[in-house]
Image (cartoon, rainbow, N blue to C red):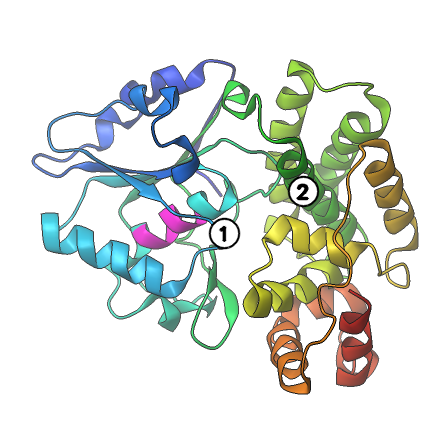
Amino acid sequence: MVDYVVYGRGSFNQLDEIIAPHRADGKPMVFLVDHFFEGKPLVNRVPLRDNDKIIFADVTYEPKTKQVDALANQLKDEFGSVSGVIGIGGGSTMDLAKAVSLMINNPGSSADYQGWDLVKFPGVYKAGIPTLSGTGAEVSRTTVLTGPTRKLGMNSDFTPFNQIVLDPELTANAPVNQRFYTGMDCYIHCIESLTGTYLNEFSKSYGEKALELCRYIFLEKEQWDEECDDKLMMASYAGGMSIAYSQVGVAHAVSYGLSYLLGTKHGIGNCIVMNHIEEYYPEGVAEFKRMVEKNGIDIPQGICKGLTDEQFDTMINVSLGMKPLWENALGVDWEKIMTREKLRALYEKL
């Protein structure tokens, strides 16, 4: 779990004070900032000192292992080591920050650590500051990466941030579609966690609260306002905590294949899949479709049209590699239920 959490409007202004105890003599703090903010006022609020460095992270596509390795090697070559890595942005930027922190202190390539509990050493100090809400990356014990052969996280006890700063002011004026897609990532976390075989009282308590908040934001609330920003930030936190001790399910497992082959962003990919999996989550999918309609969102259709057999096989291989997700969704005999043929038929609908 994350060691320290600060929440509240304006809490970003405390960042200099928050990270001060973690500064080591001569070693910079590195701020990985979503490239969306380049040239925008938020950058001027980053508390730079001495030889601190801002790196604008290009997250047009989700983080790749080669991007992580390049950034970690760049920092080691330039500074030897750093005091810490601060990720400021959406889920991709925060995942990138977690991965770079780990790779400063672990040998080899980040691709070597794609899987469960493979990371051997703690990373340098790392803090996460979300500017979009919903992914749960701020509290997750994974950092999702696309590697040479698969899309899979660095899932470990060393992965979570040491500190997060949750300031809803930073999410104001987010693009409507992007805000919806990340919000639905949170909603889908809840549906998959609360209906999964891994469910326990810890997961249930957080998942139920996150689900309540999502329903209020995306179904009951008439128009978006500051209250929605506040509540979605807490829904993201609670939704992420819900899967910390359980797992996600079918939508995430299938969307990983889309991301790996087609580069589909995570939130959009989850929505594309959720539109077609009534068989597994009938009530959740029906409610999801009401949220889509109420918020006037167009979910992409036909993205798998015209793919080759080889391409379908690539997506299927990536998806079926997410064994804990399938087991949570379908039970220990999941391989008898989700065959390659059935998964191929599902991809063909997307």
Nearer-the-camera pick, 8 or 203: 8
| Label 2: how many Cα within 10 Å (few below 14, some 14–19, many 20+) | many
Q: Which region of the structure is painted magenta?
A: 95-100
**Could you tell me residue 165's position as x and y percent?**
44, 27
**Could you tell me residue 184's position as x and y percent?**
71, 42
- Residue 276 belongs to the span the image colors magenta: no
- Residue 96 belongs to the span the image colors magenta: yes
Q: Quadrant of residue 199?
A: bottom right
Identify residue type, mark 2.
Tyr
Which residue is denoted by mark 1 in the rendering?
141
Residue at position x 75%, y 75% from top?
332
**Could you tell me residue 227's position as x and y percent?**
68, 16
Q: Residue furthest front?
A: 306
The answer to whether residue 94 is above or below residue 106 is above
Say which element carries label 2. Answer: helix
Q: Quadrant of residue 120?
A: bottom left
Of helix, strand and loop, which mostly describes the magenta segment?
A: helix
Q: Earlier in the sequence, mark 1 or mark 2?
A: 1
Which of pointers 1 and 2 indicates the residue nearer the eye? 2
Residue at position x 18%, y 50% from top?
75
Kindly indicate whether the residue at mark 2 contacts the one at mark 1 (C-beta within 8 angstroms): no
- Mark sitting on residue 181: 2
Nearer-the-camera pick, 269 or 262: 262
